[in-house]
Every structure is written in structure tokens, then in C-alpha cells.
Image (cartoon, grey):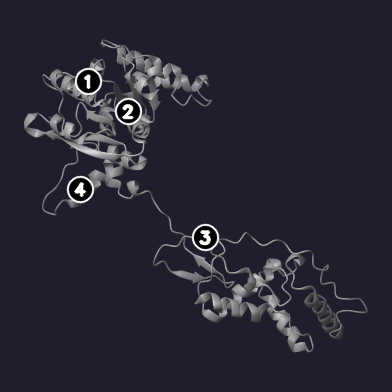
Amino acid sequence: MRVPLLVSVARVSVLPVPLSNPGRLEEIRRRRALLPPDLHDDPGYAIESPWWDDYRRYETDKRRRAGFLGDRDYNFGPPPRPRRPLPQQSATATNKTALVNSNDKTPTRAHLDLISCSLSRISSCAPMAPTAQVLTAPGQDRRCDGGGGEVRKPAVRCHPALSSEGKASIRGVVGQLLAATGKDKGLVSLGVGDASVHACFRRGGEFAADAVAGAARSGEFDCYAPSHGCPAARRAVADHLSAGARHRTRESDVFMTVGGTGAITAITTVLGGAPGANILLPRPGFAPYESACDLVGAEPRFYDLLPRHGWEADLAGVHALADSATAAIVIINPNNPCGAVYSVQHLIQIAETARDLGIPVIADEIYARMVFGGSKFVPMATYAHIAPVITIGGISKRFMVPGWRLGWLAFCDPNGTLKHNCD
């Protein structure tokens, strides 16, 4: 046991000793030298008063005999001040009775330092009972510093949802796929949708550079913005989403975010934060949705996309997965990673399924209107009269400026279902 050793060393190391011969005084001097240098001349951490007086007399006599002093006494400093209070002991700290001297006086900082140094010399840095709760990972090495104390490397703990980059970012997924390829077979990465890395696709400066520069020069946006976004930006997004739409989006229904991923994190936190909540996610799907669920403690439940039916959602499977704790269903249209563009009929089926389950639809439309051939994109909010729709959008893909990090959440709930349920 380490604690009995501590008690034994404490009683031997710090009890006052008779000052009957110079050898004893040399022992006192040796003990004092073990204190940290910054405490050598600090009376607030001085040893017991009888020791202090005898030590001053001893130093004075020694210097007078050596010819350094005349008739005056050696100015070793003022007498000890009242001792400073010790730091608050933790629940796991050593019993205080083991740290007091034979006269049952309050232990001093000098006592504690002497004990630590003595233990380090006797037991080769054996672990002491901690006076603070220090986390040390199992198996971590412990080493001794120069003053006899123990230095422990802190255990840095990451959130489990972020321990694997494959779930936290699409780049992590791509990295895992590239690492899994064999030497004999190459792999062309189509995982990161950023055409703007090529100069021929850089169009941001053509349609918005003057507006952005003007906003920066105006100084009107140097202050803190409202947490839900600047009114002008919200109004612009609302007008953009309302153009030709069945249901108009109001400015107050739009919330600006740091890109589409910021919108995913925000809505998952809001809807998935209830105890026991689960969110229905498509499989294959976009990896950060699962990571966002893990961060807030929501359970991700995966419904399949059917390759033989144009990657449409398996709505029978959705019904089987949902329960009273289901908070929402996520659809990605146009779809990432499958590339499907859902038909009007299928969108209506999704809205009716959400209505039957009593949940909103989170419609990830970051690729809105980016379709090819005869496909036609229809916003999910067109059917918000069937079930509430929360649209995730941004300018990263369609306008090819992902580095600008501008996204939004837009609520479309003409029947007031969400407000009624929240109230």
C-alpha cells in the first residue's frame, strides 16, 4: 500500500528535531534546500518557528566566524507570517492527520513539498495519493520531474462521434475508399463535389463579387449579426425559394447557417435532442448526417434506397422503422450519392408517409435544379400542405462557391403543424 508509506515518511521527514548539535542544523538546512527555489526566502512558507529562530542563529554564527559579519545579526528575513491555507483537498486526498507534526499543528506547504521530495527519493517516483483529480489514460507512462513531483500526461478524450473521420466528413469517406484500393487498380474520386477547384468553373466573381465587395466596404456588416442571419440575406433566400413555388416562404421562416453542413448540424440538434429520439436517414446517404445524430445523442435509423426502382425510398421500410420517438425523415433530392431525381409521384408518397407518421420531412436540396436530360427538379416544399417540410439549401453547389460557406434552413408549414406541436 502506498498510503502507509506516505504516513511513515511524513512523520520521519517533517517532525521537529532537537537542535543540540551542528549535525542537526545541517539536516534542517538540507531539508530546506529541497524546497522550490522560489520559496527559499518566502517567510509565508517557512518551517516551524523554533526551527526558524535556531536556523537564523546558526547562520549568523557561521558567517561571523567566517568574517562576513561584524556585531550585527545575519539578515535572513522577517519572522514567519501566518501560514497560508492549503489548497482544497479532494475526496481522494491523503488523510490530513498524516500530514501534521507531533504538536498537531496545521500542516504547511513546506511539509507537503518535503513529503513529495522524500517519497520521490525513497520510492523512485511511486504514485502518491492525488490532491486533485488528474485523468491519466490506462497504460500511460508516468515520469518524475526535477523537483521530485510527478508529471502525468493528461488523457485527451474526443467525442466518439468524431473519432472516425469517415463519419464526420465526406473527405474522410473518400480517404478510406482511396486507402482501400489495391496496387493494381486505380480509383477516380468523384466524392468531393467542388468544381471550383478548376479555374474554368470559377464563376463566383462574375455574379457576386461587386455585391460582396460593396457589403464589405459599407461597414454595415462589421457588427455582430443576428443569430438567425442578417434580414437582407434571409429576405433574399425567401424570395429565391418562393419564385414559382406553390407555397410562399417568408423571411421569418429562413435561418442562415455556415454552409449546408451547418444546417444539418442545427436541425439535427433541434429535432434529435429529445431523449430517445431517432431520425430516419437514407442508405446510401451523406455521412455527416449520422455523425450529427451521434453528436446530439439521436439514434440514426437507416431506410434503403432501391436501385431497381431508380433509387427511390423504400417507404414500406420507413413505416417499419418509425415509432413514437421518430423525430423526422431525411430525403436528399437530387440525391447524393446516387444521382436520382425524384418524381412528383414519389415526392407525394414521401409527404403522405411523413403525414401518417406525424413527422416533418428534412429535404436536403443542396443540389437543387442541377439535373440532366429529361429529369425535372420539384422542391419538396411544394407538398408542405401534406406534411411540414424543412429545406436545407445553400449556394455551394449550384453557384459553385463552396468556400463562401453560405447555407440555410427554410421552414414551410402552411398548416402550422410544427408550431402547434412545439407549443
Mark whose residue sits in front, 1 or 2: 1
Q: Earlier in the sequence, mark 4 or mark 1?
A: 4
- How far apart, in angstroms, are the residues tagged by discs 3 and 2? 48 Å
Location of mark 3 (residue): 133
Mark 3 residue crowding within 10 angstroms, few (<14) / some (14–19) / many (20+): few
Amino acid type at image mark 1: Arg
Location of mark 4 (residue): 178
Q: Is residue 134 above or below residue 423?
A: below
Q: Is residue 195 above or below residue 189?
A: above
Amino acid type at image mark 2: Val
Location of mark 2 (residue): 401
Label 2, secondary structure: give it.
Answer: loop
Residue 125 visible? The answer is no
Mark 1 residue crowding within 10 angstroms, few (<14) / some (14–19) / many (20+): some
Residue 31 visible? The answer is yes
Q: Nearer the viewer, residue 150 or 417?
A: 417
Is the C-beta separation of discs 1 and 3 under 8 Å? no
Residue at point 91%, 79% (across, down):
70
x and y, in percent, of residue 128 in the image: 53, 71
Residue at point 25%, 20% (across, down):
387
Mark whose residue sits in front, 1 or 3: 3
Mark whose residue sits in front, 4 or 3: 3
Q: Earlier in the sequence, mark 1 or mark 2?
A: 1
Label 4, secondary structure: give it.
Answer: helix
- How far apart, in angstroms, are the residues tagged by discs 4 and 1? 30 Å
Label 1, secondary structure: give it.
Answer: loop
x and y, in percent, of residue 179 in the image: 21, 51
Q: In this image, 216 relative to 208: left or right?
A: right
Is the C-beta separation of discs 3 and 2 under 8 Å? no
